[in-house]
Image (tube, helix red, strand yellow):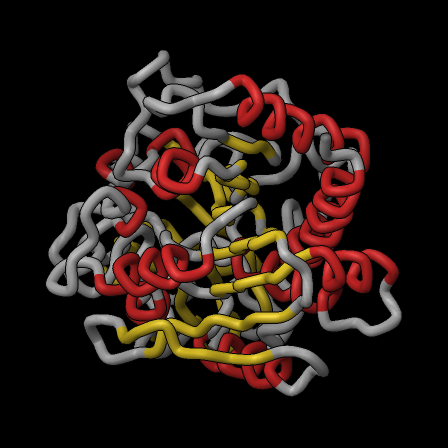
Amino acid sequence: MTDILIHSQFDAGNIEVLSIDGAEARLAIRKDNQSEFYQWFHFRVSGAAGRELVLKITGLAGSAYPDGWPGYRAVVSEDREDWVRAATSFDRDAEDGTLTIRHTPQGDALWLAYFAPYSMERHHDLVAAAAQAEGVTHRCLGTSLDGRPIDCLELGEGEVQVWLYARQHPGETMAEWWMEGALDLLTDPADPWGRTLREKCRFHIVPNANPDGSARGHLRTNAAGVNLNREWHAPSAERSPEVLAILSAMDGTGVDFAIDVHGDEAIPAVFIAGFDGIPSWTDAQGQGYARYREILERRTPDFQTRLGYPTARPGKANMAMSTNQLAERFGCVSMTLEMPFKDHNDLPCERQGWSPERSKALARDCLAALGEWLETRG
C-alpha cells in the first residue's frame, strides 16, 4: 500500500516529517523562528481515504506548555470549515513526549491542527466585510516586520474608549474567532446590544496583532521570535513594531476599557486575568474589574472564576504585559480573556471540544456584559 503524503507549506502550516510508513507517520513541530517556543501544528495528509491514520508527534516534553497535552484532542477537517476532535492520546515517556492522533477520513485529503485555524485570507475577508458596514472605518496602525498591515476597525459614537485586540500569540486562533463574533454583533444594525454599545462607546478593534507569526505558523512570537505580550513596557520598531503601533494609537485615543483575547493550553475553562499588582492600583479600578467578571459569569455558563492564573502581589505586576501596562498607563479596566485549546470541562462537547462557534458566541456574551457593566457604572 502506498505511503500517505504530508504537507504544511501553506498559511499557518507547521510540521516536520521524520518518517512515513503506509498510513503511519512520525512527526515533530517546528519551533517559532529565532525562538524556543513550539506547540502549534497545522498540516495536511493526502492519500488517506478509508485508512486509519496513526500520526505520532514526538519531542513534546520540550514544547512551550507540556501540561497542555494530557487530555487534549487534535482537531481535523476534510472541508476546512467543520473542525471536529480526533481520538488523541499522550505518552510522556515515548520519544521525549508523544502525541498520537488516530483518525479514518472518508476522503483523500485531511487537515489537522492544534485548534481550528484562522487564516490570513479569512482575516482579510473579515476586515473587508466589517469595513463595509455602516459607521465602520478602517485604518492601518502600522506595519509588521514582514511588511504586513496592523489592521484596526473603528466604530461607535460614544465617549467610552474601548480597545479589543487579539492574537498577540498567533497560535491562539480562538482569539480571532472571538473577534469575528464581536464584529458580527457590533456591525449588526438590529442587535440591541450592538446599538447600545455603539451609542455609548468608541470601539478600536485589532483582530490580529501578530500577522507575521500567524502566517508563519508560530505559536507565540512574531517574525523575530519576540513574545509581543512581553513588550508593552518598551516596544521598539526593531523588535516589536506591532506593539509600538497599537500602543501609540492607544495613546492617541485613551483607553477606558480593554480586552486582550487569548487561548490557554492547559486550563480546560474560560477565565479572565486582571491587573493585580500594578503600582497605581486603586480600589475603584479593582471593583470595576470584579464587577465585570461577576456580570459575565452570570450571563453565560461558559465563563467561570474558579480556575485561572495566580494573582500578583501588590507592586509585583509584570508591566511588560499589555493588561498591566494599560491599567497602569490609562487607569482603565483592562483584562486578558483566556479560552481553552482543550474541551470546556464544565460544558464538554465530544464532537468539537471548545470550538470556533463557542468562541464567537462567547464574544457576544462578553459584549453584552460590557453593555450591562456600562449601564450600572457608578
Q: Left or right of 278: which side holds 32?
A: left
227 in relation to 299, above or below: below
Q: Left or right of 71: which side holds 24?
A: left
Identity of the residue drawn at 16% across and 58% down: 236
Q: What is the quadrant of residue 96 in the picture? A: top left
Identity of the residue drawn at 81% across and 57% down: 196
Q: Looking at the picture, how far across and down is residue 256, in whole percent?
A: 54, 45
Q: Looking at the picture, how far across and down is residue 154, in whole percent?
A: 56, 70
Q: Left or right of 67: which side holds 352?
A: right
The answer to whether one can see residue 268 in this image is yes
Q: Nearer the viewer, residue 299 or 13?
A: 299
Q: Quadrant of the N terminus?
A: bottom left
Identity of the residue drawn at 82% across and 56% down: 193
Q: Looking at the picture, how far across and down is residue 283, in whole percent?
A: 54, 17
Q: Nearer the viewer, residue 344 or 103?
A: 344
Q: Left or right of 343: which side holds 164?
A: left
